[in-house]
Image (spheres, rainbow, N blue to C red):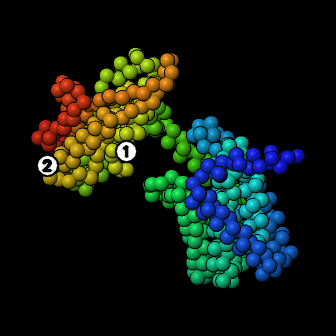
Amino acid sequence: MYEPASRARFITRWAVWRLDSRVIASILLVESAVLALVVTSAALERVTREHLVLTAWLVAFGVLHTEVATGIERIRRQVAGTSYFDLSSVWTFAAAVLLPPALAAGVIVVLYVHLWIRVWRPARVPLYRHVFTTATVVLAAFVAHVVTSRAGGIQGWPGDLSSLGTIALAILLYVTVNTALVGGAIALTNPPARPGELLGHWDDNALEIATLCLGALAAIALTANPWLVVLVLPPLLVLHRAVLVRQLEEVANTDGKTGLLTAAAWHARATRAIGRAEKARESVAVLICDLDHFKAINDMHGHLAGDQVLAAVATALRAEVRGRDLVGRFGGEEFVVLVPDLPLENGGRAEVHAVGERIRHRISMLTVAVDTPDGALTVSGLGISVGGAVLPPEGATLEQVMKIADASLYAAKRDGRNTVRIAGLAQIPAARNPTA
């Protein structure tokens, strides 16, 4: 038993109190709205025996799904470092369209408590974040319930296009409400957040929509024959494995020290980007960046400190290029950048030179806190040499452009280092001639 003073100290240590007051207020507002909706709907809607049976089926299959997927997710933890990819919206969406809001909220709470015990608490996810996620799912489910109930609910397979449209609208609103609430919390917690962080990546949103479509099919199956829901489990496990394969590919294509593309992954994607640029008659440029005197950092502070410097330089590089530019680690202390969509005037050489100068200036101003055998130190005064080449719309191979960019890099080294040299279009080999 906690004494009052001990209980008070325990509560004040909760991670939620370290958040900004606006974030705390927003969390409490959402959770209060959820509680009010559940209490109101519980008083207004009648619960039947059929509703209770459906609730039991949804809880049973939701818990079974989590347990069966644990093996796949354990592999993901070992490889990708993420704890769990939540596909429980199959069951929460089915609950939303089949049950009164109060019972649907009960299903969601039970499933998310089970997820907390089996997944998120061992992964040390803050409890307030899990509670807030549960609340956003309940609100999204409430909106989906309103849409389907006004259209008469789901009874068997959709009989016409209007009922199919109702399901599609419910899925769209479910995703929109959930994304908006989570995105709003992220915007308040980590300003200024990028659109991709607020709205999620396209692949993740597509996966969520696919999962909700399975949820709609599960709801329809439950109204026909509950045992048909067993057929939903194999596609769910395939989705889990598909996400695992995608993350394995990302790990294989990502440099472990810098988080950038590996040389092989960068080369493959750059080749495809050049092919697209040729079809669109656009110019593309390649920059090769070499960190000056990096060996001295390793010799003076150790290789672990050198790795921290490389990671900081990689972050700075990404900050100075566009989201669609390809940034990779070429090897050692060398980095490579592909800059597509350049203007045709002079091949965009001025724009590429400006990118190189921004990178050079950013690195020169960088200070990196590193851990060394002598304690914590700060590395500053870094320099980086940048060589570049512009590929004309007529085309040249990536290897040809890389050779010119590499020659420009060595020219920058000869000119005193920490400089930028960009080759002009006249220095690029002529267009490919298959018959030559």
Closest to the observer: 94 or 381? Answer: 381
Residue on which the image places disc 2: 346
- Mark 2 and mark 1 lie on one chain; the one further toward the N terminus is 1
Q: Residue at x 53, y 58 (%)?
A: 188
Residue lying at 34% horizontally and 49% vertically, measured from the top left: 322
- Give the foreground label among 2 and 1: 1
Res 435 label: none
Residue at 45%, 54% in the rendered image: 192
Q: Position of residue 425 (x, y in %)?
A: 14, 43
Type of amino acid at the residue the image marks with label 1? Ala
Q: Residue furthest top?
A: 299
Q: Residues within 10 Å of mark 2 (few under 14, many from 20)?
A: some
Instruction: Give the CA separation, mark 2 to mark 1.
Output: 26 Å
Q: Position of residue 135 (x, y in %)?
A: 67, 63
Q: Residue at x 60, y 63 (%)?
A: 26
Q: Secondary structure at mark 2?
A: helix
Callout 1 crowding tier (Cα within 10 Å): few <14, some 14–19, many ≥20: few
User: In the image, is residue 31 above or below residue 78?
Assistant: below
Q: Viewed as shown, does residue 345 lie left or right of 225?
A: left
Give the labeled residue for mark 1: 319
Q: Quadrant of residue 367?
A: top left
- Whether residue 167 appears in this view of the structure is yes
State the residue in front, 105 or 203: 105
Work out whether 107 lies above or below 50.
above
Screen quadrant of the C terminus: top left
**Up-down: is 204 above or below 167?**
above
Give the x, y percent position of residue 298.
41, 19
Q: Quadrant of residue 29?
A: bottom right
In the rendering, at what x and y percent does residue 216 appear? 65, 69
Mark 1: secondary structure: helix
Q: Which residue is more in the foreground, 372 or 209? A: 372
